Amino acid sequence: MIPELGHFSAIMGLMSAIGIALFGFFGAMRNRSSWVDMSIRLSKVQVAVLAMSFLLLILAFLDDDFSVLYVANNSNTALPWYYKVCGVWGAHEGSFLLWTLITAIWTVLVATRARHIPLKLHGYVLGTLGVLSVMFLAFLIFSSNPFDRLVPNVPIQGADLNPVLQDIGQVIHPPMLYIGYVGFGVTFAFGIAALATGKVDSAWARWVRPWVNTAWLFLTIGIVLGSWWAYYELGWGGWWFWDPVENASFMPWLAGTALIHSLAATEKRGAFKNWTILLTLLTFTLVLMGAFLVRSGVLSSVHAFAVDPQRGLILLTIFVLVAGGSLVLYAFRAHTLNTQVQYWGLSRELLLLINNALLVVAVFTILLGTLYPLGHEWFVGGEEKLSVGEHYFNAMFVPTMLLLSLALAIAPISRWKHTPMRLVSNALIFLGGAAVLALLLPWILADGVHLGVSCAVALAIWIIATHVIAWYRQRNALTLGFIGMSVAHVGFAIAVIGVAVTSVYTVSRDFRLEIGDSIDVSGTTYTLVDVQSTESPNFIGERARFDFDDRRSLFPERRFYPIREQITHEAAIAPGFFKDRYITFAGPLANNTWGVEIEDKPLQRWIWFGALLAGLAALVAMLDKRYRRLSQRDVETK
């Protein structure tokens, strides 16, 4: 009965979404506040019934109800209860139910927290979110139902959750990522509403910015958590692999970053209106493209869901309808957004324009590398499969980011309309000091200078220096918006240092060791003390003990999950502010030896610290009083 109630609740969510779309659009078109209010009430119904559907699926997992096909494929009686809960979003059907629930949560937040915006705009935003929910829920119910029964042949035991997903990362990473992913649907809705009303001004930008910042914050945290999870769970010692599924989340993040900067120019100067609207559309269409790539089965990835091509075709249809429909609307309404804003020299407007251009170039560079192998396979055919690897992405992406760093370094001293050259000259002085420090750092880390690392570190230190000076000069007139911008840029600089240093100066060595053997890696002596068998209700394995640095120990493991017949390697990591010590245990080899990989990874933590700092800066910016209360200008606009 529980699965049927969950299915019925999802259907009720679909009916509510249809009502939200109809009452929202017609209320806006006919300027009927009572109809828009009905859309608001239906958004509360939608979130309630979808929450009920989601909770019922959790209950089916906790009850080991293997009569439900999705539970049977992704759970097991020996699975700990917390992994049963996160197993709900461990595969396609359940994760898409979470997607629809998060969409409903965003919708009800917009419905209740954005009542101060003009009636037409509010109605069009709710109507657009309703249409998105209709498409997502129809896909869920008719093609990806997580409540399908497996009768009459109900298995006694489930197939177990993918061992890679049996980790704390599975508990927090996907929800965070989906909140950010789906949150950009709100900014998409605001973009569609702006095209429908033909009005994009400073007030509109102020209304949109908190929603963009919130979505970007959660997507940033989700990506950072995914990078951290891949680092320690996969046992590869890496933090980013340019995997197509990783790219699927990174591209919307880059477009969202451009959108944040474009909105600043639209709010302050009424500039870049077309840029801003196009970025609201581009960011969410990239989200939908990512959903297609991850769930269609066209990609081979450790992160991808194995889904049949038929459902992939439906997702592709949703993508084409949303992307094509929004671009057609833009083509008909873009003429209403034209503005004339004057600026000259190295102005803040010019820097924001360069920023937008570089980020969009980065997006399409990654998109080309991700889709080219698929296009080659579809159009050329043949059994040989192409792959675009790390060399292409680094060669194309890194120079773009270095150019972006130049713009960020000058950003805090720039001015709207025109920047005096004396400010630029003063900033260039700090570049010389940054270059000296950048040349010294490699000598501290290793015996030699790497030109690429030195350039990246010099630019990063320059960014930090110019922002610190800007803080000092404006210490009596700092706003939360400026603080948030500065913290984000400094976080980016710290991450750049971490990426550059750990990518070049990581030391990795493989060994065949007997018990009691000692080896030296980067001046640290590691001793394999012993290897013991481990056992859990759903896996068995071997756990090694390595001693180093005056009795400090690390315990890497190799696990075997018998139900899935899958082996995982649980890396042991000694984290540090300046470097990580990372050990992967490969298991037994011939002649009583054990396979081991030991890595020394300098400044690894700086990557995640900088990225989280940049993400949290969005939260600081949202606390600005401009976004927490209505200004008189907003009231007059309404």
Image (spheres, rainbow, N blue to C red):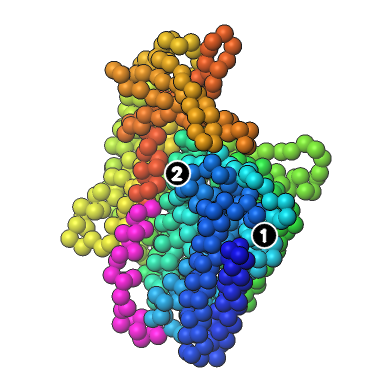
Q: Position of residue 160 (x, y in %)?
A: 59, 43
Q: Position of residue 205 (x, y in %)?
A: 42, 71
Name the residue type under label 1. Answer: Asp
The residue indicated by pointer 2 is: 168
Crowd rating for badge 1 (residues with CA inside 10 Å; few <14, some 14–19, many 20+): some
Report the Cα–Cα distance between label 1 and label 2.
28 Å
Q: Secondary structure at mark 2?
A: helix
Q: Secondary structure at mark 1?
A: loop
Q: Which residue is drawn at the image coordinates 63% and 51% (left, top)?
A: 66
Front residue (pair 403, 314): 314
Q: Is residue 116 visible?
A: yes
Q: Is residue 540 left or right of residue 635?
A: right
Q: Is residue 177 left or right of residue 70?
A: left
Span colored in magenta: 615-638
Q: Which residue is drawn at the image coordinates 29% and 50% (left, top)?
A: 467
Looking at the image, is 385 positioned above or below residue 555? below
The residue indicated by pointer 1 is: 148
Name the residue type under label 2. Answer: Ile
Front residue (pair 618, 44): 44
Q: Mark 1 or mark 2, which has the lower sequence index? A: 1
Q: Quadrant of residue 163?
A: top right
Q: Position of residue 636 (x, y in %)?
A: 36, 86
Q: Nearer the viewer, mark 1 or mark 2?
A: 1
Crowd rating for badge 2 (residues with CA inside 10 Å; few <14, some 14–19, many 20+): few
Q: Which residue is drawn at the image coordinates 32% and 78% (left, top)?
A: 630
Q: Which residue is drawn at the image coordinates 24% and 49% (left, top)?
A: 469
Front residue (pair 214, 458): 214
Q: Main secondary structure of the magenta part?
A: helix
Q: Is residue 635 magenta?
A: yes
**Pointers 1 and 2 in contact (C-beta within 8 Å):** no
Looking at the image, is 271 positioned above or below residue 425? below
